[in-house]
Amino acid sequence: MADKKLVIIPTYNEKENIGAIIEKVFSLDENFEILIIDDGSPDGTANIVKELQKNYPDSLHLLERSGKLGLGTAYITGFKYAIEHKYDYIFEMDADFSHNPDDLVHLYEACCAGADIAVGSRYISGVNVVNWPMSRVILSYYASSYVRLVTRMKIKDATAGFKCYTFKVLNAINFDRIKMKGYGFQIEMKYTAWKLGFKIVEVPIIFIDRKLGSSKMSSGIFGEAAWGVFKLRFRKIKPLKS
């Protein structure tokens, strides 16, 4: 029986990208399903997805939320959906093509080879970021250095948001204990999985900044991450199911 693979893509005002990213994922040789979690995009992103569902009724799924509730809560909503429907491999990916959909296959292969989590890493083989201002590259790179220093987790790209989880990882995590909603969510999920003893492997990718639409980053997101990472060191983490 073929592995069930779900790509979770949170959206907010992504009408310029959403149709193209869906078509690209479905063009890959591997059979991926997609779950779009839209936070009430006023630009009609969800309506575009609904039209495409006519072409992909069994593999394109949509959950609509009432407002902009945060990246972390969107992914947790998707994780719970994936667990309920028993997907073997669950992916996080942005809608704006900063994550190359072709790399979904590489992340999947890394998990098939023994990783519990495969991270699409910008920094495992140098600095592979295109079209970012130098200030943002420096901030991102040293944010990961800060995470390694504070948590002692040996991951080069701790803030990466392009990942593949195996079912057993998500099924072991108590999502009620995941507190960060923005930039820090990605760090908290990796740290939690690492403390639970799961194997994390970094897969080199090239990150290309979005060409269409606008970034959802804010200064408050970085502040939450900086303080939240420090507090992680003092948290006791236990699996949801023993």
Image (cartoon, rainbow, N blue to C red):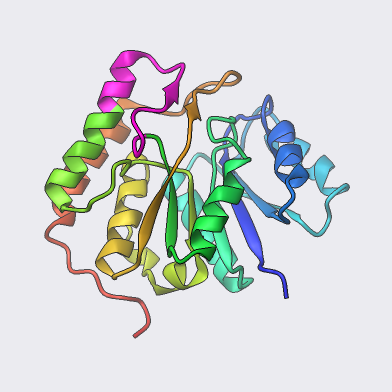
What x and y, as percent, mark residue 48? Answer: 77, 36
In the image, is 79 to the left or to the right of 196? right
In the image, is 96 to the left or to the right of 44? left
What x and y, as percent, mark residue 227? Answer: 17, 42
| Residue nearest the observer in this picture, 64 or 230 | 230
Q: Is residue 135 magenta?
A: yes
Q: Residue at x 26, y 25 (%)?
A: 139
Using the rendered view, name the quadrant where residue 128 is placed: top left
Q: Residue at x 17, y 63 (%)?
A: 235
Residue 139 in view in this figure: yes
| Residue nearest the observer in this picture, 51 or 138 | 138
Residue that sits furthest to the right in the current view: 54
| Residue nearest the observer in this picture, 220 or 29 | 29
In the image, is 83 to the left or to the right of 48? left
Q: Which residues are magenta?
A: 123-139
What x and y, as percent, mark residue 99? Answer: 54, 35
Quadrant location, the C terminus = bottom left
